[in-house]
Amino acid sequence: MFISTIAVIAIWFVAYVPESQKINGDFQIYLEQEGKDQIANSVGGNLSQQFELKESLIQKVTSIDGDYVTISSVVSGINQDTDKEVFHSEQSYHVNAYSLTYKDMPGKQFWFKPGVQKQNYDFLHPLIFADAPLVYQGTDTIDGLDVYVFKSETHNVDISYTFPQYANTKILSNTNSTFWVEPITGDLVKFEKSWKDYQVQNNETIAVNENGWKKTTDYSTFILSQTAKSQIDDYNYNAKIVPILLVSLTVGINLILILRNKLKKSNEIMLKTEKMTAIGNLSARISHDLRNTLTVIKSEVSLISLQDFKDGNMEKRVQHLMRAIDKMDYQIGGVLDFVRERPLKITKFSSNMLIQHALENIIVPDGIKIITPEQDVSMTGDLLKLEIVLSNIIINAIQAIESSGTVTISIEDKPDILAISISDSGPGIPEKYMTKIFEPLFTTKQRGTGLGLASCNIIIKSHGGRILVKNNPTTFTIELPKTKL
């Protein structure tokens, strides 16, 4: 749940939010400014009478090239007294749509990004016409918006291109600019600028070319502030509300999946419990009849064993028959092990005895060879139960081989545990079954009960050990602790 939630939030902030904040093809800014200005009428001439200045800024995207956009910027100043244009500037800027930095100057900002900080910024701002840092001054309030104030100064910036009528004369400009910026969105709300330009020939100032100031009109300030408020709502929606909704949705979906999975497991456990109850009830009914019959058989065999046999092999046959009867009794009781715990009968015996007894009642086809270990070690445990475990695993190995192959039994005597491994040359256990083979009632055999390996697992666990299984080749390893049970 935690990983999926973090992944969803990361995708949102890494993929969607930057995409929503980048400069799109419909980017456009219109800014009106008003002020006072004086301009020289000729090279070396005196300044005109002060007049009302109206200036406009229009910026828009003209082309897109991958992550970069080309923005045209047109600034036009009009003498409102004569209605004549006194200032005109056209520039094109190539800007990264995501970082808002210049293509040829990656360290310079074109515009503010959302999340403006109370610090100085290295800007080449289109409203300044020069490379000049923006210095943080403090905070202010405009139309109910909290804004940050930045100032910038330029000295002796060449703006001759804006006065083409003054050929062979350099125009140098000194300016003071103030920006009011809404910090959440990075939107400009208000702008003021004052300037004093000089005519220079042969590195000497010959006249003042222009002297004036301007500020955004009240109407533009109102429009810009309202736009910023709208942008704040969008920003908060994308940066706060949507992530909360995504987290809630992701957690909700995960909880539904977890509950669904738990419900599925609960139903599986309930179904298995019902089956186990049925098995327990059935076992309780049949165990009485079968064990009564086995008791009669065992009694008769015991009486036969008291006879003096002239044939030495007959005595061995009777012993084998007694062990077979005991094994049948244990196998009948194996089903009951799921519904009640049977105490272990701990004795000491050798590993060879365990393997020999396990193989005695197994029919081995002619094409299958059983390889037993030469090493013989002392063991402690319930001989009959461990014999059932070993027999069950060997029978499964023989059935897996089908026609011809080998079953190899090996023993590894470790410091703390004794490991008995049974490997076969069969095709292996399908990977999808590897985690289920020890579950009660799970079987892939048409005549299987699904209790064989489950019983083995219970018996080994009751000894404080475990059964491991792996493929290539298929190997079951029984690990039994050497500590006293």
Image: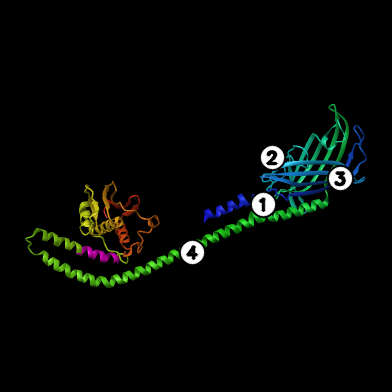
Q: Position of residue 165 (x, y in %)?
A: 88, 35
Q: Position of residue 366 (x, y in %)?
A: 22, 55
Q: For the residue marked with disc 2, what is the amino acid?
A: Lys
Mark 1 burial class by Cα count in 10 Å: few <14, some 14-19, many 20+:
few
> Which numbered mark, 3 or 4, is in the foreground of this view?
4
Mark 1 sits on what residue? 20
Q: Which residues are magenta?
A: 325-336
Q: Measuring 93% from the left and 40% from the top, which residue is drawn there?
A: 49
Q: Position of residue 305 (x, y in %)?
A: 11, 64
Mark 4 burial class by Cα count in 10 Å: few <14, some 14-19, many 20+:
few
Q: Which is nearer the N-term, disc 1 or disc 3?
A: 1
Q: Which is nearer the N-term, disc 4 or disc 1?
A: 1
Let me know if residue 304 is in the magenta part. Answer: no
- Label 3 to label 4: alpha-carbon separation: 70 Å
Mark 4 sits on what residue? 260
Q: For the residue marked with disc 1, what is the amino acid?
A: Ser
- Label 1 to label 3: alpha-carbon separation: 36 Å
Q: Position of residue 463 (x, y in %)?
A: 29, 56
Q: Which is nearer the N-term, disc 2 or disc 4?
A: 2
User: Is disc 3 in contact with disc 4, using a CB cutoff of under 8 Å?
Assistant: no
- Label 4 to label 1: alpha-carbon separation: 36 Å
- Label 3 to label 2: alpha-carbon separation: 33 Å
Mark 3 sits on what residue? 35
Which quarter of the picture shows residue 77?
top right
Q: For the residue marked with disc 3, what is the amino acid?
A: Gly
Q: Which is nearer the N-term, disc 2 or disc 1?
A: 1
Mark 3 burial class by Cα count in 10 Å: few <14, some 14-19, many 20+:
some
Residue 148, placed above or below residue 281: above
